[in-house]
Image (tube, rainbow, N blue to C red):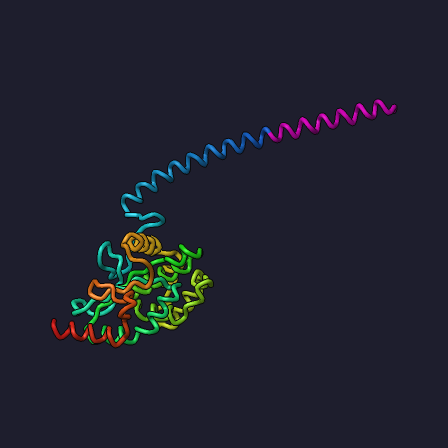
Amino acid sequence: MSDNNREGKRSARERLREERRREQTREKRKRSLLVGVAAVAVLALAGGIGVAVTQLGGKDGDGPVVAPTGANGEDSLAIPVGRAGAPSTLTVYEDFRCPACAQFEHGFRDTIRELEDKGRLRTQYHLVTIIDGNMGGSGSLNAANAAACAQDARKFRDYHDVLYRNQPQEQDDAFADKKRLIKLAGQVKGLDTAGFRACVNEGSHDGWVRKATTAFNGSGHQGTPTVLLNGKNVYADQQNPLTPDKLRKRVEDAAKKA
């Protein structure tokens, strides 16, 4: 066979292979187009369903807004601790990743719990996610959701305190790990149940936490912790800083006048 014949056959084979590649490419494009059209149809349907759920379920941004059991206040954005009708109310805006919030808790926790147990004080906790927004991550959100799940089990106070006792460094987004949050629940008697685990893993109260954060951002308060006693900001006064003894005296004085 001459070199010319061999070259002609190779060229023919190459043209045939090239034609097959082109045909395969056309078929892939057709399949992709069909899949794309189907996907658009599914998304359109899902979008219609999503609007309905939003209207019926009251969503706020991402996910349905499901308040934990017993939440109160405007839009049910606060978790109460202490006797209803107590002479004084302490309103606390906190972020579980916030070092200053941990400092406040470590300094004031025993006094606050003592006054709650005496029926002198009712504390309203608002859980927000400022550190997630500033530094990235999801530890503030996941920890707040887990605390709301503990509220469903009527064990918020104890779990709240456990989280602050085990707060990681601010740069360490360790509370993003839901397994860690569940493990910490083992320090609260009776909290680590199937229901609590499901609530944590599914982020059942994520939408509620996001709504609480949106409300805080629009409140005019400057950061966490923000602490109000009977509606007055008592923690940010640098000229007359609050101490546990001052808090106790103000609450006890209010109880005497009640």
Which residue corresponds to the image point at 78% horizontal and 27% vertical from the top-left? 10
Does any portion of residue 149 appear in the rendered image? no
The C terminus sits in image quarter:
bottom left
Magenta stretch contains residue 143: no
Residue 91 in which image quadrant: bottom left
148 to the left or right of 17: left
Query: What secondary structure is the magenta-colored segment mainly?
Result: helix
Give whichever of 134, 201 is nearer the camera. 134
Residue 29: give x, y in percent of width and height. Answer: 56, 31
Magenta part of the protein: which range?
Answer: 1-25
Q: Is residue 9 above or below residue 145?
A: above
The N terminus sits in image quarter:
top right
Which residue corresponds to the image point at 36% horizontal and 49% vertical from the top-left? 62
Which residue corresponds to the image point at 65% horizontal and 30% vertical from the top-left? 21
Magenta stretch contains residue 13: yes
Residue 15 in which image quadrant: top right
Give whichever of 26, 92 is nearer the camera. 92
Does any portion of residue 214 appear in the rendered image? yes
Residue at the extreme right: 2
Residue 31: give x, y in percent of width and height. Answer: 54, 32
Residue 211: give x, y in percent of width and height. Answer: 31, 53
